[in-house]
Image (cartoon, rainbow, N blue to C red):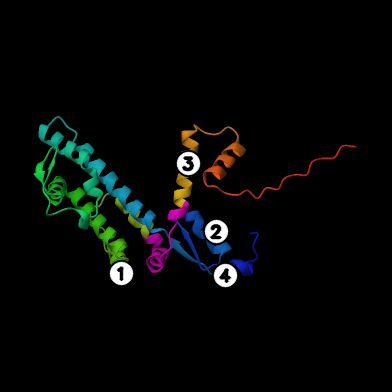
Amino acid sequence: MNYSLNDRRNVETVTIDMNAGYVSVIKELFPKAKIIIDRFHLVQLINRSMNKCRISVMNQLRTSDNEDMKKYRRLKRYWKLILKKKSALSSVEYKYYSLFGQRLETSIVEEILAYDPVLKANYELYQALLKAMEEKDFKMLESCLINPVHPLISSYMKTSIKTLKEHLPYIHNSFNYPYNNGKIEGINNKIKVLNRVAYGYRNFMNYKKRIILHFKLKTTEQKQPRSQTA
């Protein structure tokens, strides 16, 4: 609000995460700016939903049955393969995997998905959304979200789909513009790490000075003139 409305009207784009409060504020402050959703947060949203679905299925297999426990341990150990992009899974290189033996990454994922139809249905939707975001194919993304939801889709993924639908116009902008919040997110993360390794700062000014020193920033504070004594 330190800038005039005319100046704020010159702002062309603003990049945000999917916090609902940001959208209403930006529309008021920057009336002509196009809102862009950072693509990292799009991927993170569906990634977390897919992982919660995996954990839910995994916990159902934690029984006294040996075969169920075998499946449970596999789901727990190889969670990264479930979240990995399908195109990044190796289909030519055999490796030894604990609990599986000599296998391909693709065959491990296929076997794990066969454990539960809910897991498989969510995985297929997850991969379709990932592909649409990677290729910036808005029509593909829109069809994944607007088509009737599969009856086996988990509540976690349904919530993510609802959130994506609400932000569709801004997601479209993120496919058309190259901007993201990667740099500022990195700075925020470093500041949090500084706070954590110091076990917190009692004095805020000391905290601020430590941040300024770490990032080699220059302060705008001016030295106060010494008071003259009579």
Q: Magenta residues?
A: 165-184
The residue identified by callout 2 is 25
Image quadrant holding the N terminus, namely bottom right
> In front of the other: label 4 or label 3?
3
Distance from the alpha carbon under mark 2 to that under mark 4: 16 Å
Distance from the alpha carbon under mark 4 to that under mark 3: 33 Å
Label 2 neighbour load within 10 Å: few <14, some 14-19, many 20+ = few
Is 5 a magenta residue? no
Label 3 neighbour load within 10 Å: few <14, some 14-19, many 20+ = few
Looking at the image, residue 98 sits to the left or right of residue 202; the answer is left
Is 176 a magenta residue? yes
Amino acid bearing label 4: Asn
Dot 1 or dot 2: first in sequence order is 2
Disc marking residue 192: 3
Rendering quarter of residue 78? top left
The residue identified by callout 1 is 139
Distance from the alpha carbon under mark 3 to that under mark 1: 38 Å
Q: Position of residue 35 (x, y in %)?
A: 47, 64
Q: Please say whether residue 30 is visible from this viewpoint.
A: yes
Dot 2 or dot 3: first in sequence order is 2
